[in-house]
Amino acid sequence: MSKTHKTLKKDSNKWIWLIGMVIMIIIILCPIYMMFKYSISDRTSVVTGGAVIPLWPYQPTTEQFNGLLENKGFINAFFTSLEVALLTVCISLVLGAPAAFSLARYKIPGKALIMILLISVRLFPDVVSVIPVTETFIKLKLTNSVLGVSLAHTLLGIPYVIYIAMGVFETIPKDLEEQAQILGASKLYAFLKIIIPIALPGLAAAAIYVFLLSWNEFIFSYFLLLFGESTTLPVLLKKILSWSPQHNTLAAISVMLSVPVIIFTFIVQKYMQAGATAGAVK
């Protein structure tokens, strides 16, 4: 194969990859653009009487966002969802990280069975487990409370936290904690001050996943908050859909639902850096 032919083949592969990436970016950005466009659309840009809907609103407006921000029910549901999601992340990490570390570091009898039981929580649809969970929480008086919903969401998210964290802890050399213990550090101190800081990239990824799971969860929130005054955004959205709102209202709600996820991701992304353990052990 001539040098010229190899060069042409290499250039053609670059162009194929470049075109593929451009297509993927367009596919990802189009729904986001449509959502944002509808969220700032005026009524005439949505109800066109059969005419083609414009690519950009005739008169962009923030009327939909103003209406949502003035709606006390929406604001209360927003902060309830945020509180539930953040509390779920904290509980899942506090319980899941030590459990994952124990499973990754120590030879535990029946470890394979434990892992199967953990993941079996997610093998069944949520609608199957919501009834027994709700009955149990009623007996424990945890219904109609943020803590109760957070604990239910923790049941859904903690298997993923354990699996993700296990993979992270298994990549951290044992030499680090052994050296710390030789110098007089306890196992708890080595875990909190040495292992956890190194494992932050993986734990941050798990935190983002759990936050998304809790933020979007509907069925447990609906049953556990059914008779209370508080509600979450997915439950409130179900009520809003019952009166068939216009596209611009739904788009504005979608934007408001997306903002906390984006902010939370940006906050924790600084911990998601590859190579955190590179050169840690000489």
Image (tube, rainbow, N blue to C red):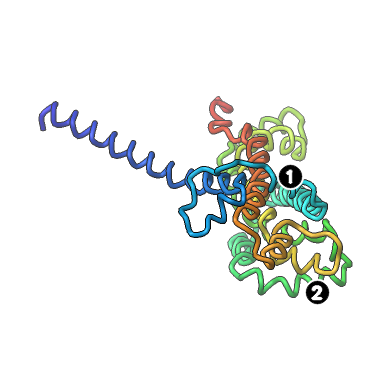
Q: Quadrant of the C terminus?
A: top right
Name which of mark 2 and mark 1 comes first in the sequence: 1
Q: Is residue 224 left or right of residue 36?
A: right
Vertical relation: 69 (above or below) 250: above
Return the residue at label 1: 66
Q: Is residue 89 left or right of residue 251?
A: right
Q: Amino acid at mark 2?
A: Glu
Q: Position of residue 175 (x, y in %)?
A: 61, 34
Q: Position of residue 72 (x, y in %)?
A: 82, 52
Q: Residue at x 10, y 29 (%)?
A: 2
Which disc number belongs to residue 135? 2
Q: Residue at x 79, y 66 (%)?
A: 224
Question: CA separation, marks 2 and 1?
Answer: 39 Å
Q: Position of residue 49 (x, y in %)?
A: 52, 59
Q: Quadrant of the N terminus?
A: top left
Choose mark 2 or mark 1, whichever is in front: 1
Of residue 220 and residue 35, the one placed in the foreground of this image is 35
